[in-house]
Image: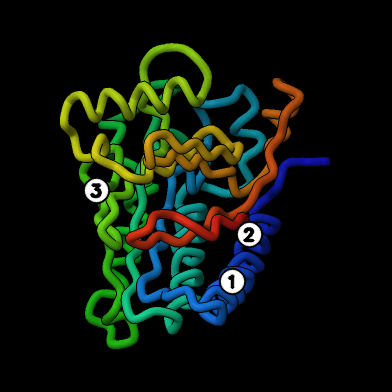
Amino acid sequence: GTDWGVDQTVEYIKEAIVKAKQNIKDLKRLGTVIDEIYIIGLGDLLENCFGFFEHQSYNIEITRSEQEHIARLMVLEILDGLLALAPTIVIGGVVGNHSEYRSAKGSVTTTRLDNSDTAIFQIVGEIIEGRERYKHVKTVIPDDFYLTLEVKTKRISFYHGHMTGGGGNAETKIMNWLKNQAMARLPAGTSDVLVTGHYHHLRVLTERGRTWIQSPSLDTSMELEARMGLTTSHGVLTFTLSKDGWDNLKIL
């Protein structure tokens, strides 16, 4: 196989919108109340044109501004697809590493929060501002590496996962980060649910009623397969959240 290009990724997102609409309708039919929909970007919505892999400038199909344009169109298409399915919709995102503005490998030109992953949602928020059909949509852009929200009496945090210290596997790094957030009395440390990106493979871990959900990546990676022999069961992470906690986890 080959790495996915723009066309395959766009097509997959379009299919996921159809699946998401059906999933919401099925859940409602079974008695699940869905009065809010959250569309949250977990980072790495686009690929820098160089600075991560040796062959990157050869592999990237389109320019950064073209990638940002398509990413905005996709956010709007997801939003429009789900627009009529709940009286309240929230869109937002967190920064990842691949969307940083870099001048060389590992070298950011400004700060690591100066990033397309949040700018894309910020611009979409500006596009829909004041328009009647989007009056029930709220945009949330954090000024930190994570986004913590109160949803149905629960606290949920979204975090890409690249800003962790220390060694170990994904679980060790993320759980240590979460414990340290709690130790420092920072908002993410109060989370009932933590959702992360960055590590590509679906993971779910519950400890004392608090859950870490690691999202799978949207597409597959030949680079990962070549280096590790691994790839990922890719897809779009969806689940419900109520006062009783998370439920109905489904990868679209």
Question: Which of the marked residues, 3 or 1, is nearer the chain's N terminus?
Answer: 1
Vertical relation: 4 (above or below) 86: above
Quadrant where the C terminus sits is: bottom right
At a point 21% along the width and 44% down the height, the residue shown is: 143
Q: Tell me where residue 52 appears, x and y as whole percent.
A: 53, 26
Q: CA distance from mark 3 to mark 2?
A: 26 Å
Residue type for callout 1: Asn
Find residue 23 and name its label. 1
Q: Badges 1 and 2: C-beta atoms under 8 Å apart?
A: yes
Q: Secondary structure at mark 3?
A: loop
Question: Which of the marked residues, 1 or 2, is nearer the chain's N terminus?
Answer: 1
Q: Secondary structure at mark 1?
A: helix
Between marks 3 and 2 in the image, the one whose residue lies nearer the viewer: 2
For the residue carrying disc 2, how many other residues have a C-alpha within 10 Å: few (<14), some (14-19), or many (20+)? Answer: some
Write down the residue under mark 3. 142
State the colouring used for the structure image.
rainbow
Q: CA distance from mark 1 to mark 2?
A: 9 Å
